[in-house]
């Protein structure tokens, strides 16, 4: 039975997505501050990919399982998705408080694993939450609003790094094996934002009760034995993959190259600026934060502007063009040594990031059933973390033996992969025949 969903006002859609701000602030710190912390604590550059394997592994395991569990959850008091992203936010906040005080490298690596579990618990149900609440005609606005908050969260994270490095970093000589105290403040802000923004959305946005058919399925799941209930999410994931529409397999092909390239970019901007601009680790980290600051400002500006463009020209074309633009930006960055001019390519990167964070979710949400939206959003995330996992396992040796331990070559490699993903995105066609029943 299809649930008739009322259209929401702009501010209702805004309020339901505020919690994404805190989640993305945390991811912003992971993109920009985590790898410099690893370098401060003595990690070799060729180890950066494998040290970041926590993200792919926890995403691969946590998101589809949490998605399947949330599909079979309902509480009149707490809702369906909200309990999961609330617990994830609390876990993430605790890790963010502890992270900058890491005494040794492997302590920081362990905290990254726990932080990623919390972030993934919060992230996946939030994607399904938007699909649950909005009628199809508002899905593009809902997911592009999430894209706006992706930009805002990462913008605040990286803006705080730049600000605190300017205010408290000074000309202090960086001591080997220690994390500078100016980095602490950004993590403390993130810990507060993670929980407060989620609480705001939880309190402001009621969830739509499940249909009678969904309630029957939920109660049937609750009546099973503990062993059967533990096994149920894995059965749901397996069955959903078997029934997955061809469209999602095509998205997976795009994501293979797109997310492999993104992980290279996030890991190697700091080493790149140490090489091309002769910066120290702290200066390179600050420059990397400015890059992220710039492209996320662009993301915030263009995120909602992409809604009418996708409606007019189709999500496929806008998405593919954005990936080609991102490739151009990565080809340009290694050859610009001026710290101001190197921010210019981030305009194209920011447009691409806005499209990546919204358009695929809109298209996928239209071809998956309501009662399995959580598990399919989890499977979509598997398509993100699998290429990231492949990158963490393969790119270290590629960087060391094929690319000559050269961060310039790493960035060009990522540009090639973005080009491939753009061509693959041209194959994305949403068809009613592909909808799962």
Image (tube, rainbow, N blue to C red):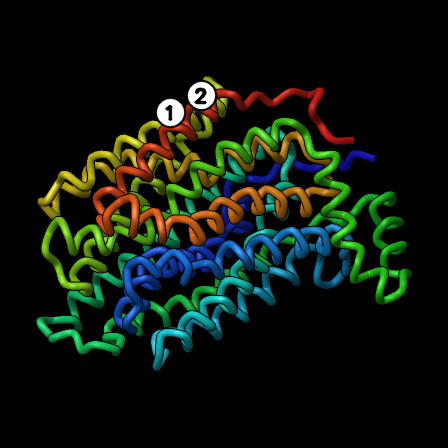
- Estimate how packed mark 2 is, as few (under 14), some (14 to 19) or many (20 or more) residues with alpha carbons within 10 Å: some
Q: Position of residue 257 (x, y in %)?
A: 44, 36
> Which residue is located at x 25 percent, y 40 percent?
346
In what element is the residue under mark 1? helix
Q: How many marks?
A: 2
Q: Position of residue 322 (x, y in %)?
A: 37, 29
Residue 371 showing in the rendered view: no
In the rendered view, does 87 fall on the left or right side of 221? left
Q: Nearer the viewer, residue 115 or 269?
A: 269
> Which residue is located at x 17 percent, y 52 percent?
273
Q: Is residue 378 above or below residue 74?
A: above
| Cβ atoms under marks 2 and 1 closer than 8 Å | yes
In the rendered view, does 70 fall on the left or right side of 22? right
Q: Name the residue furthest top.
A: 313
In the rendered view, does 77 fall on the left or right side of 179? right
Q: Which residue is mark 2?
A: 317
- The residues bearing labels 2 and 1 have C-alpha atoms spaced at a distance of 6 Å
Q: Is residue 342 above or below residue 326?
A: below
Q: Quadrant of residue 157?
A: bottom left
In what element is the residue under mark 2? helix
Disc marking residue 321: 1
> Which residue is located at x 36 percent, y 42 percent?
300
Q: Which image quarter holds the C terminus?
A: top right
> Which residue is located at x 55 percent, y 55 percent?
59
Q: Nearer the viewer, residue 331 or 28?
A: 331
Q: Position of residue 34 (x, y in %)?
A: 35, 64
């Amino acid at each position: 039975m299809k649930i008739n969903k009322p259209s929401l006002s702009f501010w209702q859609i805004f309020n339901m997505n505020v919690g994404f701000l805190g989640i993305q602030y945390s991811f912003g710190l992971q993109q920009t501050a985590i790898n410099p912390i690893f370098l401060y604590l003595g990690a070799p550059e060729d180890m950066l990919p494998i040290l970041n394997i926590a993200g792919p592994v926890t995403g691969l395991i946590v998101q589809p399982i949490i998605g399947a569990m949330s599909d079979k959850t309902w509480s009149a008091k707490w809702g369906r998705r909200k309990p999961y992203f609330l617990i994830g936010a609390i876990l993430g906040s605790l890790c963010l408080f502890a992270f900058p005080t890491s005494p040794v490298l492997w302590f920081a690596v362990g905290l990254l694993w726990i932080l990623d579990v919390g972030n993934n618990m919060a992230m996946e149900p939030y994607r399904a939450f938007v699909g649950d609440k909005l009628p199809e005609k508002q899905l593009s606005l809902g997911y592009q609003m999430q894209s706006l908050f992706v930009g805002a969260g990462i913008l605040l994270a990286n803006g705080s790094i730049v600000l605190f490095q300017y205010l408290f970093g000074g000309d202090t000589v960086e001591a080997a094996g220690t994390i500078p105290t100016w980095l602490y403040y950004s993590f403390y802000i993130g810990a507060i934002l993670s929980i407060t923004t989620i609480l705001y959305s939880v309190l402001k946005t009621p969830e739509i009760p499940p249909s009678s058919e969904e309630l029957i399925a939920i109660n049937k799941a609750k009546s099973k034995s503990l062993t059967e209930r533990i096994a149920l999410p894995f059965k749901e994931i397996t069955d959903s993959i078997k029934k997955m529409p061809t469209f999602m397999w095509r998205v997976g092909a795009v994501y293979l190259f797109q997310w492999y390239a993104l992980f290279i970019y996030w890991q190697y901007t700091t080493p790149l600026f140490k090489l091309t601009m002769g910066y120290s680790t702290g200066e390179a980290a600050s420059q990397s934060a400015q890059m992220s600051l710039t492209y996320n400002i662009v993301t915030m500006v263009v995120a909602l502007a992409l809604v009418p463009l996708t409606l007019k020209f189709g999500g496929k074309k806008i998405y593919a063009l954005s990936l080609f633009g991102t490739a151009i930006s990565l080809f340009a960055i290694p050859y610009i040594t001026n710290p101001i001019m190197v921010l210019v390519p981030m305009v194209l990167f920011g447009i691409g990031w806005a499209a990546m964070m919204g358009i695929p979710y809109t298209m996928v949400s239209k071809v998956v059933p309501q009662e399995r939206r959580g598990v399919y959003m989890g499977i979509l995330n598997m398509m993100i973390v699998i290429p990231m996992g492949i990158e963490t396992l393969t790119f270290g040796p590629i960087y060391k033996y094929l690319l000559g331990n050269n961060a310039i070559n790493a960035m060009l490699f990522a540009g090639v992969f973005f080009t491939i993903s753009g061509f693959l995105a041209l194959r994305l066609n949403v068809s009613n025949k592909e909808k799962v029943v």
